Image (spheres, helix red, strand yellow):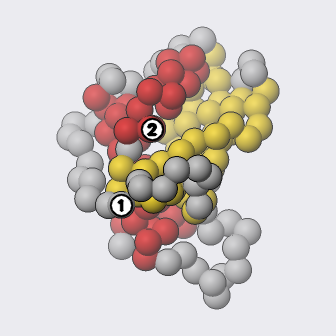
Amino acid sequence: MFGQFLLEQGVEIELPVGINSILGFLDEEIPKFKHKEYCYDIDSCKSDLKTLWQFTVKARMLEETGTAMLLVAILVLEKGDDMTTLVKIPPVIEGRKKQAGPSENQIELFSSFVFQMLNGFRSKGFSSMPEALPVT
């Protein structure tokens, strides 16, 4: 239920760290994210090297090598100043046909990715969430 809310509303968080720290985090941590029989791959799809980075996050089966199969999220990083970065994950259902809503698997993959990312920000000291979010 909460996963569908996140999927429909998106996520936005301003972190008190520079964009290079966030890029390093993404490079190190996202390959470690798992959900059931899936892992996550991240690819840069658009950037203005000074102020904006946009990535696609896709899920693929753990046993399969090669190209990821399912688009999970678009991740956008915007440089605020040297010590702040805005992290945004726009709603996934934007631009999709309303009648062809997301599957339960898409909702789970999206919310698991978001929760693991937010927990990672917390563990690195990038955010001050009081507790880790539950990840299944």
Cβ–Cβ under 8 Å for marks 1 and 2: no
Element marked by disc 1? loop
Calculate the distance from the C-alpha at mark 1 to the C-alpha at mark 2: 15 Å
Packing grade of label 2 (10 A; few <14, some 14-19, many >=20) is some
The amino acid beneath tag 1 is Glu
* Residue 87 in sight from this viewpoint: yes
Left/right placement of residue 64 relative to residue 130 reads right
Taking the spot 62% from the left edge, 52% from the top edge, the residue there is 67
Q: Position of residue 42 (x, y in %)?
A: 57, 42
The amino acid beneath tag 2 is Ile
Q: Position of residue 38 (x, y in %)?
A: 41, 57
Quadrant including the C terminus: bottom left
In the displayed orientation, state which residue is furthest to the left: 131
Taking the spot 65% from the left edge, 24% from the top edge, the residue there is 79
Taking the spot 45% from the left edge, 38% from the top edge, the residue there is 30
Q: Which residue is mark 2?
A: 30
Q: Position of residue 26 (x, y in %)?
A: 50, 31
Q: Which residue is mark 1?
A: 37
* Towards the viewer: 91 or 65: 65
In the displayed orientation, state which residue is furthest to the bottom: 99
* Towards the viewer: 80 or 117: 117
* Residue 91 in sight from this viewpoint: no
Packing grade of label 1 (10 A; few <14, some 14-19, many >=20) is few
Taking the spot 52% from the left edge, 50% from the top edge, the residue there is 65
Q: Sequence order check: which comes first, mark 1 or mark 2?
A: 2
In the displayed orientation, state which residue is furthest to the top: 82
Element marked by disc 2? helix
Question: Residue 108 appears in which quarter of the rendering?
Answer: bottom left
Front position among marks 1 and 2: 1
The total number of labels drawn is 2
Left/right placement of residue 64 relative to residue 78 reads left
* Towards the viewer: 73 or 11: 73
